Image (cartoon, rainbow, N blue to C red):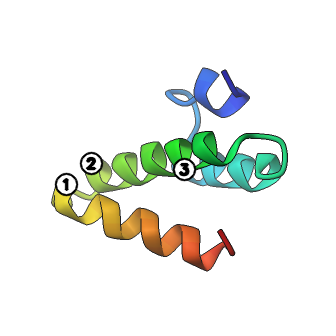
Amino acid sequence: MCLICVDFDKLTIEESIKNLGEMKEVISEDHYIEVVNKIMTRIAEKYDLSPDLIAPMVTDYLSDNDF
């Protein structure tokens, strides 16, 4: 398990995103997408957004980060 997942409940959203950027080259593509999904789910929950927005948020994040 990656360090982001180990400490996910302790990290802020901002810390999670920063750490993900730093780990992008060392985790698998599948796990990267899984972590992005976890972060986007947390954002949706924090701001009381519809769960239907999570998939588009993940897609946007991945495309914005050359994935």
Of 46 and 6, nearer the camera is 6
Quarter location, residue 52? bottom left
Quarter location, residue 40? bottom left
Q: Is residue 22 left or right of residue 52?
A: right
| Residue type at the position of mark 2 | Glu
| Residue type at the position of mark 1 | Pro
Mark 2 vs 1: CB contact within 8 A: no
Which residue is denoted by mark 2 in the rendering?
45
Marks 2 and 1, Cα distance to the nearest angstrom?
Answer: 8 Å
SS assignment at label 2: helix
State which tag comes first along the sequence, 2 or 3.
3
Q: How busy is the neighbourhood of tag 3: few (under 14 within 10 Å), some, or many (20 plus)?
A: some
Mark 2 vs 3: CB contact within 8 A: no
Disc number for residue 33: 3
State the residue at coordinates (19%, 54%).
51
Q: How busy is the neighbourhood of tag 2: few (under 14 within 10 Å), some, or many (20 plus)?
A: few
State the residue at coordinates (72%, 27%).
3
State the residue at coordinates (25%, 65%).
53
Which residue is denoted by mark 1 in the rendering?
51
SS assignment at label 1: helix
Instruction: Point out the image quarter for the C terminus.
Output: bottom right
Does the image show residue 7?
no
Q: How busy is the neighbourhood of tag 1: few (under 14 within 10 Å), some, or many (20 plus)?
A: few
